[in-house]
Amino acid sequence: FAKGANGTGSLGALLRAFKDAGVNLTKFESRPMDRATNFETWFYIEFDGHLHGMADRDIFEKHGLVWLGSYPRSDG
């Protein structure tokens, strides 16, 4: 999540955006932020797609997400 996006319903809104765009989430993990004072959490999301895909890019821009990278998918 972007900074400040820790309010009620923000996680649900993000998950709904992926669902509405038809993007398949393959992994969802949470970790506490360093020096967190109010239980702030980082979320790491893996999904089928790429930042250059239109729906994926729109979700990242709208929700202020940070792209950490990508790797090729193996269909074998």
Image (cartoon, helix red, strand yellow):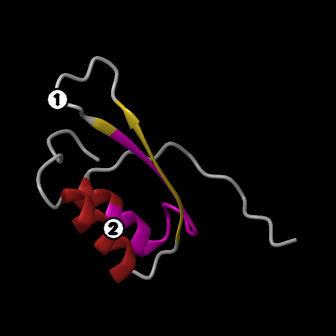
The residue wearing badge 2 is 15
The percent position of residue 1, horizontal first and vertical second, equals 29, 47
Q: Is residue 75 above or below residue 28?
A: below
Question: What range is drawn magenta here?
Answer: 42-59
Most extreme residue toward the top is 35
Magenta-drawn stretch contains 47: yes
Magenta-drawn stretch contains 65: no
The percent position of residue 69, horizontal first and vertical second, equals 56, 46
Image label count: 2
The residue wearing badge 1 is 38
> At x 56% / y 68%, what residue is drawn?
49
> At x 42% / y 67%, what residue is drawn?
56
Front-most of residues 69 and 8 = 8
Mark positioned earlier in the residue sequence (1 or 2): 2
Horizontal placement of 21 versus 13: left or right?
right
Indicate the quadrant containing the C terminus: top left, top right, bottom left or bottom right: bottom right
The kind of secondary structure element at disc 1 is loop
Q: Is residue 27 above or below residue 23?
A: above
> At x 29% / y 64%, what residue is drawn?
14
Q: Which amino acid, mark 1?
A: Asn
Q: Which amino acid, mark 2?
A: Leu
> Which numbered disc, 1 or 2, marks the residue closer to the eye?
1
